[in-house]
Amino acid sequence: MSDGFDVDGVIGRSSTPADAAGVPAEWARLRRPILGEADAVMDPAEARDLVDEFRRVRDRHRDRFVAPATELFTDPARIATAYLNLAGAATLDLRRHQLEDLVDLQSFIDDPPADLAPPRGSSEPGVTSPADPLIEAIRWRQAGVIAWAMGHPSEVAAHNAIRGRWTAIGDARAAIDLVNHYRDEQTLGLGATALWLVAAPAGYLIAILLGLAGPTIVALVLLAIGWLLSPSLGSVAGAIEWRIQRSGWMRRHPAISEPLERGLGFGLIAGVPFVAGVLVAMVVSNLGWP
């Protein structure tokens, strides 16, 4: 089995996530994710049989939001353990599918309602607010297993990413993608905030040293205001990276897409504040402001 993790959503090994706060006490048991035993050894043939049988059961319940655990042929945690035993020998693509299966597994519960669907009036398909309490508990399960597989310290960020989303059985990849997108935006937002403190003053000083502008207080105030707005620059960079990740052509050419994605993201959060520092210094100085 692998001891690592992949931010794109594959099975790895990590510690069990802590209980999330803010969920009603009556759902405390249900909200805990179904996780396998990372150190349990299982015969590969038996593990493959368990996975194949689960997928057959899962396929019967595609597009539903809950399914009866009684239709599972064994303890759900044993099914999760089977996936963990197969993860180490699987390709990256197969491990992504394995994580999708584990997210689907979270929707199998005891005594599910016969008919459960988002109420009418959702802002977009599969999304509604406020959440049904049962779906909210399952959502914490899904967030927990995604965070655990990706090695995140907490499932809170994963839950924030899929908050309000009704993830149907068979649609786990969409939820995993939302978690990746959310974390990318958060990371780039923090990076943009930190880099603005370095790149914008650097651009400002370069403009002064090259004789393009003189030192002004107004320029420094404007750059400080820009720093307050810099997290939005990270969101823009994240949206661009997201489009690259979702591009069919780019997905078929990872050798091109990954450097391009990282290069554009870093270029935006580092280049924009530097250029802003130069331009603000020049414009304010030319206007004669103090």
Image (cartoon, rainbow, N blue to C red):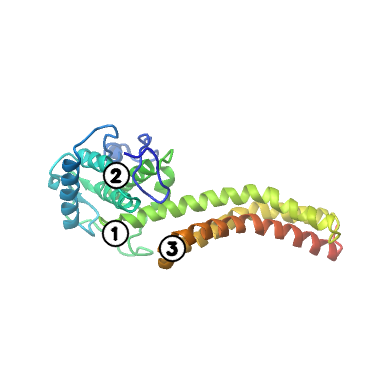
| Label 1 crowd (10 A; few <14 / some 14-19 / many >=20) | some
User: Cβ–Cβ below 8 Å for labels 1 and 2?
Assistant: no
Q: Residue at x 86, y 57 (%)?
A: 214
Q: Position of residue 219 (x, y in %)?
A: 78, 56
Q: CA distance from mark 3 to mark 2?
A: 24 Å
Observer-nearest residue: 231 or 201?
201
Q: Position of residue 23 (x, y in %)?
A: 35, 41
Residue 196: tell me if it is visible. Answer: yes
Q: Position of residue 169 (x, y in %)?
A: 25, 55
Residue indicated by mark 3:
253
| Label 2 crowd (10 A; few <14 / some 14-19 / many >=20) | few
Asked which secondary structure carries label 3, the reply is loop
Q: Mark 2 belongs to which amino acid? A: Ala
Residue indicated by mark 1:
118
Q: Mark 3 belongs to which amino acid? A: His
Q: Residue at x 52, y 50 (%)?
A: 186
Q: Mark 1 belongs to which amino acid? A: Pro
Asked which secondary structure carries label 1, the reply is loop
Residue 163: tell me if it is visible. Answer: no
Observer-nearest residue: 37 or 76?
37
Q: Residue at x 37, y 52 (%)?
A: 176
Q: Position of residue 289 (x, y in %)?
A: 85, 60
- 1 vs 2, front mark: 2
Residue indicated by mark 2:
89
- 3 vs 1, front mark: 3
The first of marks 3 and 2 along the sequence is: 2
64 left or right, relative to 238: left
29 left or right, relative to 164: left
The first of marks 1 and 2 along the sequence is: 2
The first of marks 3 and 1 along the sequence is: 1
